[in-house]
Image: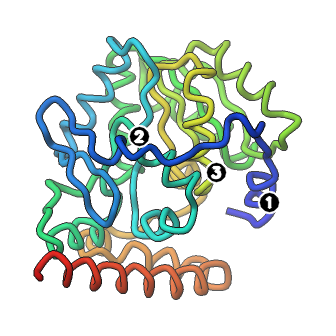
Amino acid sequence: MSSEFHSHAAAVAFPQERILRPDPAAATRVDAQGNRVIVMECPFDSVTFDQAVDRVIDWCRHATSAKTVVTMNAALLVSMRKDAALAAACHAGDLIVPDGVPVVWASSLVRRPLTARVAGCDLMQALLARGGREGLRVFFLGARENVVAELARRCAHDYPGLQVAGYRNGYFTDSDVADVVAQVRHSSADIVFIGMPSPFKEIFAERHRDDFNAPVIMGVGGSFDVLAGFVKRAPASWQKVGMEWSWRLLMEPRKLWRRYLVTNTLFLAHVARDTVKSRF
């Protein structure tokens, strides 16, 4: 993802009255089965991959209010600790799942084991497949124009029955926000996938969850580039042992080396601290 994309996303401003603030109650909410647990100050839904898919599809059919899906990785956990608006947006998620083996490992170390990893890219693919079988409408927001256009083309071809209600690239500024929101709203999508970087996608999804008039909004980061065939994903063996981040580092070393060096170090420090606290 280019630096230009990041600068565009970061440039979007929001009215002061819509600034997100942490909700203390959000971190202690549990779902109907009592499966929400706290790991590193973040509430997670301890669900299997299939349960996550079923829950989202059920929301598409029966939800009476907009739901947000947050796929939480190590970098996001670290960023939440210094970004109050990001923390508020993530805590407000209606489904929060661990997107990364390191997060699942960390949950075991602090004696709050999560059920399984639910990777955002995999979850998006599964929802597209189910959406094809059930005739759902989807909207893609994010990435470069050629990427999102190719994603829309592939999904229409690969998932018969899926209705691509619309798409828009992620290069817009604060003056374009009203038009972007209107385009999504008028699409009547069942699921809005936001393929933009953090913390923008989480905050944007939360601030506009009601404006979109869609049952489900899900941030998927760089998944558009992967599913459109522009970026090769790490082999399954690397994913299984929690080394997908290192694959991405190999693919884009100049862009990512500093981010992963700092983020991974801070993540390990937080895990060590929370592990000590949980045992003593």
Establish if 55 lies above or below 86.
Answer: above
Q: Relative to residue 165, is residue 99 drawn left or right?
A: left
Q: Amino acid at mark 1?
A: Ser
Q: Position of residue 199 (x, y in %)?
A: 59, 56
Q: Position of residue 84 (x, y in %)?
A: 56, 57
Among the 4 quarters of the image, the one containing residue 33: top left
Q: Secondary structure at mark 2?
A: loop
Q: Relative to residue 166, is residue 189 drawn left or right?
A: left
Q: Secondary structure at mark 3?
A: helix
Among the 4 quarters of the image, the one containing residue 161: top left
Quarter containing the C terminus: bottom left
In the picture, the disc for residue 93 is 2
The answer to which of marks 3 and 2 sits earlier in the sequence is 2
Q: CA distance from mark 3 to mark 2?
A: 15 Å
Q: Relative to residue 56, is residue 259 drawn left or right?
A: right
Q: Nearer the viewer, residue 18 or 143?
A: 18
Q: Amino acid at mark 2?
A: Gly
Which of pointers 2 and 1 indicates the residue nearer the eye? Answer: 2
Q: CA distance from mark 3 to mark 1?
A: 11 Å
Q: Residue, x 56% and y 16% (percent of image)?
A: 213
**Which residue matches tag 1?**
7
Establish if 145 lies above or below 68.
Answer: below
Discs 2, 1 touching: Cβ within 8 Å: no
**Which residue matches tag 3?**
200
Q: Nearer the viewer, residue 84 or 150?
A: 84
Q: Residue, x 35% and y 84% (percent of image)?
A: 268
Q: CA distance from mark 2 to mark 1?
A: 25 Å
Q: Relative to residue 24, is residue 198 drawn left or right?
A: right
The answer to which of marks 3 and 1 sits earlier in the sequence is 1
